[in-house]
Structures are given as C-alpha cells and as structure tokens.
Image: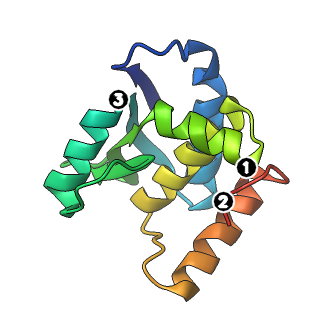
C-alpha cells in the first residue's frame, strides 16, 4: 500500500505526513484492500471550491474530496484525495481536535469514500461514522 502526501499550499504540513499515511493504511486494511496507490494532496480554499463545483456541481469549498483513478492495482484501488488545510484547521479548532487528528480524520474519510462508503442518507452516514470511529479510536470526530 502506498499513500503519497503532496502539498500544493503555503502551509507547512510535512510533520503530519507519517501519521496521515498510517491512518489511511488502517482505513484500507479495515476495508480489506490489499493493494492501493493513493495520493493525498493539500490544496487551498479556491482550488477545493473549484474541484467541488466542477466534479460535484456544488459551488462551495469543502474539507475533503475523493476521486477514483483510472487503473487500480489488481487487488486494490487507486485514487486521489484532496484536503483543504484552511478548512481542516477551522474544523479542528471548532471541535477541539489537533491539526494532526483532523488531518487523520479527513484522510480516513477520503479513503472510506474510495472504498465505497458514503453519507448520502442517514443509514449510510451512521455506517461510515461507525467505521471511522473504529479506525481512529476515541479521537473527537464530526458527528
């Protein structure tokens, strides 16, 4: 399993890379994924807003977006996750998480989307949040 962390922002986030990779790998293992190539890219507010508008038709910034890549490894998946550190910092402050906790939450959330989980209805949201809690343990989360 490979998770690449890329930073296309002015924010210094290198110290969070290793813990984010471990959280992402834990999420992949919990979904039974044996092979994966995932890129996690930090992007600024305007970029994530544009991505959200272009690919989801929603003209507002969001915290995390996930996209499947074309060719996946034979026994796994491939995709890209985009995280907005500005929004992540606001959310972390609001719920009392550290930035590392919030970035792990968003990485796991993005990986679960790549694994087929969503939160389009209440039952799916409960299932996804329960999976996130199990992966992340007792950290504060978005309920």
- Using the rendered view, name the quadrant where residue 131 is placed: bottom right
Whether residue 2 is visible, yes or no, is: no
Name the image quarter holding the C terminus.
Answer: bottom right
Q: Is residue 124 above or below residue 65?
A: below
Q: Residues within 10 Å of mark 2 (few under 14, many from 20)?
A: few
Residue at point 63%, 79% (across, down): 126
- Label whose residue precedes the other's in the sequence (3 or 1): 3
Q: Residues within 10 Å of mark 3 (few under 14, many from 20)?
A: many
Residue contact between numbered discs 1 and 2, judged by CB atoms under 8 Å:
yes
Question: What's the mark number on residue 95?
Answer: 1
Residue 58: x percent and y percent?
Answer: 24, 61
Question: What's the mark number on residue 142?
Answer: 2
How far apart, in angstroms, are the residues tagged by discs 1 and 2? 8 Å
Residue 94: x percent and y percent?
Answer: 68, 46
Q: In the image, 120: left or right of 56? A: right
How far apart, in angstroms, are the residues tagged by discs 3 and 1? 21 Å
Q: Residues within 10 Å of mark 1 (few under 14, many from 20)?
A: few
Residue 9: x percent and y percent?
Answer: 37, 19
Q: In the image, 135: left or right of 20? A: right
Residue 32: x percent and y percent?
Answer: 56, 60
Whether residue 65 is visible, yes or no, is: yes
Q: Circle 1 sits in a helix, a strand or a loop, which is it?
A: helix
Q: For this rendering, which residue is in front, 90 or 23?
A: 90
Instruction: Identify the residue position indicated by label 3 in the image.
Output: 44
């Amino acid at each position: 399993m490979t998770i690449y962390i890329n930073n296309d922002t002015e924010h210094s986030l290198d110290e969070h890379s290793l813990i984010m990779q471990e959280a992402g790998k834990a999420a992949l293992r919990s979904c039974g994924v044996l092979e994966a190539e995932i890129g996690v890219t930090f992007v600024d507010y305007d970029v994530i807003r544009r991505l959200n508008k272009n690919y989801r038709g929603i003209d507002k910034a969001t915290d995390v977006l996930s996209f499947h890549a074309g060719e996946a490894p034979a026994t796994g998946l491939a995709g890209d996750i985009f995280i907005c550190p500005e929004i992540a910092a606001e959310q972390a402050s609001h719920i009392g998480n550290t930035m590392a906790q919030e970035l792990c939450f968003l990485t796991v959330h993005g990986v679960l989307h790549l694994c087929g989980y969503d939160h389009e209805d209440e039952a799916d949201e409960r299932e996804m949040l329960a999976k996130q809690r199990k992966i992340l343990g007792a950290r504060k989360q978005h309920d």
